[in-house]
Image (spheres, rainbow, N blue to C red):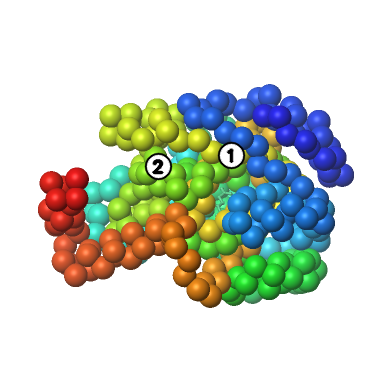
Amino acid sequence: MATSVERSPESGEDAYSTIRGELKQYSFQTEPVPRLHHLDPRVEALMRAEKPVVITDTNLVKSAFHWDADYLSSNIGSAKQTVYSSYKNKFLYYDDKKLPQFPDLQLATKHEEMTFKEFTEKVKNHKKGDKIYYLQQALNDSVGKSLVLDFIKFNWSWATEQQKKYKWGALTSNLLLVGMDGVITPAHYDEQQNFFAQIGGFKRFLLFDPSMFECLYPYPVYHPHDRQSQVDFDNPDHERFPNFRNLYGQEAIVGPGDVLYLPIYWWHQVESVPNHGMTVSVNFWYKSGTEEKIVYPLKPQQKVAMMRNIEKMVTSAINNHEEVPHLLKTMVLGRYT
Ligand SMILES: O=C(O)CCC(=O)C(=O)O
Ligand SMILES: [Fe+2]
């Protein structure tokens, strides 16, 4: 991946080029996500166009650079945290609320509640073949005082300036992610704008624009894996998912101090780079702003939102998700095809 990487004081250019040489290859092509200083005018151009960019030197979470496992263990408090566990390194997300409809669904990932100390013990004692753990907990007011102070010192003025400039809605949450070496969040999209701030270790992002919906075959909206791709990137089933061959995207490596702007509805697979230790990240999820005026043709992300609404409406009106495919096929096959 040929990208101009600026020297970042916390990690150094060397780490990025070493990592780039070690990454596993997939069947699709990617281009590098631009990596730019926060004052570079190209940042604004990319963000206005809702395109991803790695923004350097924002100091967004500088006050949290000491958030390693030991510090978090001693200071996050004794509240139970949301931790996912799995024997495989892929942590496919599922929506608990949609599980009751799918009693037979086999989930490789289990949701466990434990204190941060318990989590760190599991990480420290991990041996090959043991379960892998990935903590994903929204920062809330249960955290200890020193964490609250670090949180208050995030560069909120920068964040709020961006929120206003791009007319985003409210900040909904900050998810803290602490992952063991090599954990993967498989390809999915979210319905919020995201500043993804890296604190410790390195993550690789594979990114695909919203028009790639056709190549990534998300699960149905009513399914617990809604918004997640059904395609296994390591072993794609080309017969079931023929358009996967047409997939291409962008990729970025984020290290300590980097902030990735991850636009709403963009697909992303996130991988904690293997053999570079545990990763610590905090994201900033914002509601999208309201469009002032609809402009045609609609953008791919607006079409995705529209398709979601149609799927939701049909599923809810028919009141039995098993009838949805037949109904949609009857509408389309031989008529619109
Ligand atoms: O870092 C990860 O593993 C997943 C993060 C993610 O999907 C997000 O912030 O939207
Ligand atoms: Fe996500």
Question: In the picture shown, does residue 214 fall above or below 141?
Answer: above
Q: Residue beneath label 1, please?
A: 250
* Residue visible at 47% across and 50% down in the picture: 210
Left or right: 187, with 163 as reference point = left
Q: Amino acid at mark 1?
A: Gln
Of the 4 image quadrants, the one containing the C terminus is top left
Residue furthest front in the image: 296
* Residue 95: % across, % down: 39, 59
Q: Quadrant of residue 133?
A: top right
Q: Which mark is residue 216?
A: 2
* Residue visible at 69% across and 56% down in the picture: 45
What secondary structure is marked by label 2? helix
Instruction: Find out whether the residues at labels 1 and 2 contact each other: C-beta distance under 8 Å.
Output: no
Q: Can residue 171 be seen in the rendering of this structure?
A: no
Label 2: how many residues lie within 10 Å, few (<14), some (14-19) or many (20+)? many
Q: Amino acid at mark 2?
A: Leu
Question: In the picture shown, does residue 281 fall above or below 183?
Answer: below
Left or right: 60, with 298 as reference point = right
